[in-house]
Image (cartoon, grey):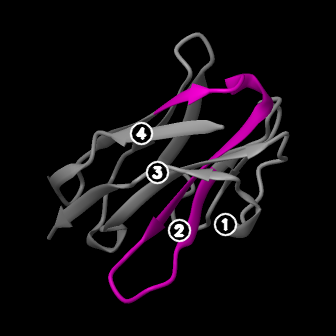
């Protein structure tokens, strides 16, 4: 079992930055691929960013490429999502997810554990 707790969401103006954190507890953090997904009101959950369990591969949605950066600190069992140049269309609930020995899938169904989500609101 893995428990995931996101933090760092909030209200920010367009062009601003936020850093989301996802603290993991439970089984070995190093054996999990970690991903970030988001869900806006009335829309399906969509992939944002992920890296493979080994950390060797990183993936981003086209909509955030060049603006968002995913990273992990294995010593702290934490994964981060640095979000720069935020746009109103980035407004959503952001979820952290873990996939045991995963390769960094962009498919939500392949993830085994999910956090409760953190709200990000970008005003224009």
Q: Position of residue 124 (x, y in %)?
A: 14, 70
Residue pictured at 83% horizontal, 32% vertical: 56
Q: Which mark is residue 63?
A: 2
Depth-wise, is mark 3 or mark 1 nearer the camera? 1
Q: CA gap, disc 3 to disc 2? A: 9 Å
Of marks 1 and 4, the one in the foreground? 4
| Residue 81 appears in the rendering | no
The residue under label 1 is 108
Crowding at mark 3 (Cα within 10 Å: few <14, some 14-19, many 20+): some
> Is 87 placed left or right of 30 in the picture?
left
Task: Say which label, 1 or 2, has the lower sequence index.
Answer: 2
Q: Earlier in the sequence, mark 3 or mark 4?
A: 4
In this view, the mark in front (4 or 2): 4
Considering every residue shown, the one lying at the far bottom of the view is 42
Mark 3: secondary structure:
loop
Q: Look at the image and give the residue range highlighted in magenta.
A: 23-49
Residue located beneath label 3 in the image: 67
- Considering only order in the chain, which callout, 2 or 4, is on the residue closer to the N terminus? 4
């Amino acid at each position: 079992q893995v428990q995931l707790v996101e933090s760092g969401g909030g209200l920010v103006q367009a062009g601003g930055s936020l850093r989301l954190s996802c603290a993991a507890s439970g089984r070995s953090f190093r054996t999990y691929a970690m991903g970030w997904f988001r869900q806006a009101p009335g829309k399906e959950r969509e992939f944002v960013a992920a890296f493979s369990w080994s950390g060797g591969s990183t993936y981003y949605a086209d909509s955030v490429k060049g603006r968002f950066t995913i990273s992990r600190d294995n010593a702290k069992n934490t994964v981060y999502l640095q979000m720069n140049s935020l746009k109103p269309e980035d407004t959503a609930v952001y979820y952290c997810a873990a996939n045991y020995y995963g390769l960094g899938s962009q498919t939500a169904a392949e993830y085994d554990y999910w956090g409760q989500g953190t709200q990000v609101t970008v005003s224009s």
